[in-house]
Image (spheres, rainbow, N blue to C red):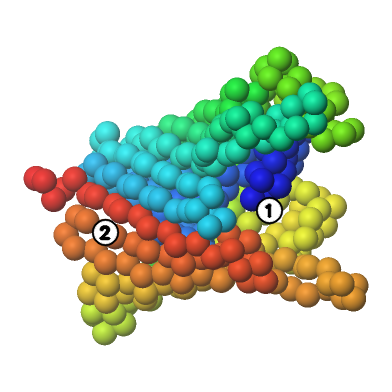
Amino acid sequence: MKKTFTTLLFLITVTVFGQAVRKYSNEFMNIGVDAAALGMSNAVTAFSADVNSGYWNPAGLVHLEDKQMALMHSSYFESIANYDYIGFAMPIDDRSSLGISVIRFAVDDILNTTQLIDDEGHINYDRISLFSTADYGVTFSYARKLPLDGFNYGINAKVIRRIIGDFASSWGFGLDAAIQFETRDEWKFGLMARDITTTFNAWAIDEDEFATIQDAVEGQNQELPETTEITIPKLQFGVAKKFIIRYDYSLLAEVDLNIRFEENNDIISTSFASISPALGLEFGYIDMIYLRTGVGNFQNELQLDNEERVSFQPSIGVGFKYKGIQVDYAFTDIGDQSVALYSNVFSLKIDFSIFR
């Protein structure tokens, strides 16, 4: 069973980019960073105001008062895939900030069993080899306060590197743009536009390596796949408000709308765009202990009896902050509650002010 799984995973991995234009390319860049945000079902576009804003809304970087660094690790599919993130950001003056972040999503040491059977039809385990697939995303962020009171803007420049063993690799480039606005009564609004120019990936395929898998499954992988991909733009709009309760307690609430320009299974879907809402809540005590929950990714799922059912993705999390160090944990489902692919996510954030 394990051999069958790894063979299928290998073949799927090699051919997954075989479309000239794929609406879901570079999906690893949509998973999210920071356990605090994941615990709120990614509903943080309006309120994000730390080093992780480079991912969620670069306009939020203007709120930094000192250098910050963030780390995150999580494992998916029973630790088959590993997702890691590191981010760094700093103010450069009283009106602007810079940031950089790196994301890696990888499946390491995959068994390549396509050559398991030799030319004489015998099984030869010495013909098994290992390979890895890895996706890298490097983001450079810039944020600045606008002359209009309460308005900030931010931009991201992204470099994508994807590697499938010795068989193929690609480079990609894209841009994000974002704004945040805060009213005098502390309502916050945020808009994040991802891949605004479409993110372009160009693949290079090793034809000699590809030839070794052309006959691994009869009738499959007979032609070289296309070598270009385009990631279509996406929008995330959020509204947030933080309520103070009896001085020591606080409640942060945010509602986001995630918009894709395609027709899919989102709870609101048209030929022009589809919308999936997300709600995140964070309960805080003395700005030190946090409890979080959220729900999002509402989908219309067709059942075996041809009836549609609305599914969703729940999440919960906790956090602890002392001085300039914050540790967060999230328990979240990367699909929806019916699939139950729940993952444990840990993240660390350090504010360099603790060293002053």
Secondary structure under the numbered disc 1 in the rendered image: loop
Q: Name the kind of residue labelled 2 in the image.
A: Gln
Position of residue 1 measured from the top left corner of the image (x, y, whole percent) = 68, 53
Position of residue 129 measured from the top left corner of the image (x, y, whole percent) = 59, 30
Residue sitting at x 11%, y 46%: 355
The image quarter in which residue 352 lies: top left
* Mark 1 and mark 2: Cα distance apart in space: 42 Å
User: Pointer 1: what residue?
Assistant: 1
Q: Earlier in the sequence, mark 1 or mark 2?
A: 1
Q: Name the kind of residue labelled 1 in the image.
A: Met
Tell me, yes or no, whether the two marked residues, 1 and 2, touch with CB atoms within 8 Å: no
Residue sitting at x 71%, y 29%: 115
70 or 277, nearer to the observer: 70
Position of residue 122 measured from the top left corner of the image (x, y, whole percent) = 75, 32
Asked whether, in this view, residue 249 is left or right of residue 175, the answer is left
User: Pointer 2: what residue?
Assistant: 326
Residue sitting at x 73%, y 22%: 212
Q: Name the residue furthest bottom.
A: 246
